[in-house]
Structure formats: C-alpha cells, structure tokens
Amino acid sequence: MPGLTKIRADWEHRYVADFVLHKFPNEMVKLRCPLGTVPELWVQELGFGKALKSYRPYRPEVDAIVITGEKLILIEAKIMKVLDGMSKLPIYRLLVPETPELKDFAEMPTEMWLVTPKKPGWEERVAKELNIHVEIFMPEWIREYYEQQEKYWTAEERLKRLKRKEVLKSLGYY
C-alpha cells in the first residue's frame, strides 16, 4: 500500500552539509563530531580506540566543526528550533579541550556559529551576550520544508494521517 509509511527526511543534516559546502568549500570540516571525553572505566575495560567508538552514542554531537588555519568554528544548524541550537553551543565550546578527536586543535581560538534560514527576532541580544555568530542561510530547497510544515496541520493532512493510522492499526502495527 503506497503512502502508508513515510521515510523520515533528515532536513537538518542536509542543511548543515549544504551550508559548510557553500561557506567553507576549501576548509577541513568534520560533520556530526562527538565532543567530550570517554569515561576512564570504558578505556580500561575496552582500550582507548574501542572505548571511543563504543561510547560515541553517549557523547554530545555538534553539527559541524570547521578547522581553518587559525581557528575552530563550531556550527549548530537549526531550521526551526533556534533556541535549542543556541543553548547547546556554549556547552560544546567547553567540551572542545577534552575531546580526543580534537586534541591537535584544542589550543586554537573557538568560535560558535548558529546557522538558521530565518532570524527569530529574539536572538540578537542573546547571541551577542553569548558571543555566538548568527548566520542566515536560505537555500532554495528549504522552501519545500516550510511548505510541508505549513500543510501539516491543515484538515486535509490531518485526515490523511488519521486514515494512515487506521490502516496501520488494522494491520496490527498499533
């Protein structure tokens, strides 16, 4: 039955990848970089390399890190929940010096960038206070995302979701 389930679109991963390609085409970039340390107990038990891999799901992850010749740029990209991205960046900056994957760059100055398609309006004073650079980036394809968001709560879309749920329920998925 086509249209029963939908593949989850990962808009923000595409968004941050497009941004770093657009803004930093010639710089070293790490996408979805884990931050912070691995507990010593894990290292003793598994060895450093295996502990690093095994503990990855428990470590916070910044959307992107750009490594230029003179600085690190931590990038958190948010299409909608700008406050979430802004609140994470200061914590991420504090974790850089203890992150094994960044040990060669830990002494570099670190900038925090929040990337979003639309200014929320409240962010200017907060960003200034926290020393976060806000970058507006609006690729053409992001309009499709906004269109989907706007349609989501319409009567027609609610009815489609209800019908899909009833079919799935009849098939034993609920």
Image (cartoon, rainbow, N blue to C red):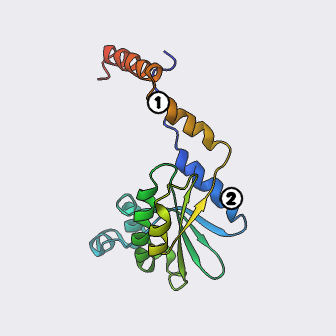
Task: Answer above or below: position of 116 versus 99.
Answer: above
Tag shown at residue 119 = none
**SS under mark 1:** helix
Tell me the quarter of the image containing the C terminus: top left
18 vs 158, left or right, is right
Q: Position of residue 150 (x, y in %)?
A: 51, 33
Earlier-in-chain disc, 2 versus 1: 2
- Identify the residue shown where x is 50% and y is 57%: 121
Residue at the image point whose x is 36% and y is 72% from the top: 47
Q: Which mark is residue 152?
A: 1
- Residue 20 makes an appearance in the image: yes
Query: Any mark on residue 21, and which?
Result: 2
Residue 81 % position (x, y): 44, 51
Secondary structure of the residue carrying tag 2 is helix
| Residue type pointed to by label 2 | Leu
Amino acid on which the number 1 mark rests in the picture: Tyr
Outermost residue, right direction? 26
Mark 2 vs mark 1: in front = 1
Q: Is residue 107 positioned above or below 152 on the image?
A: below
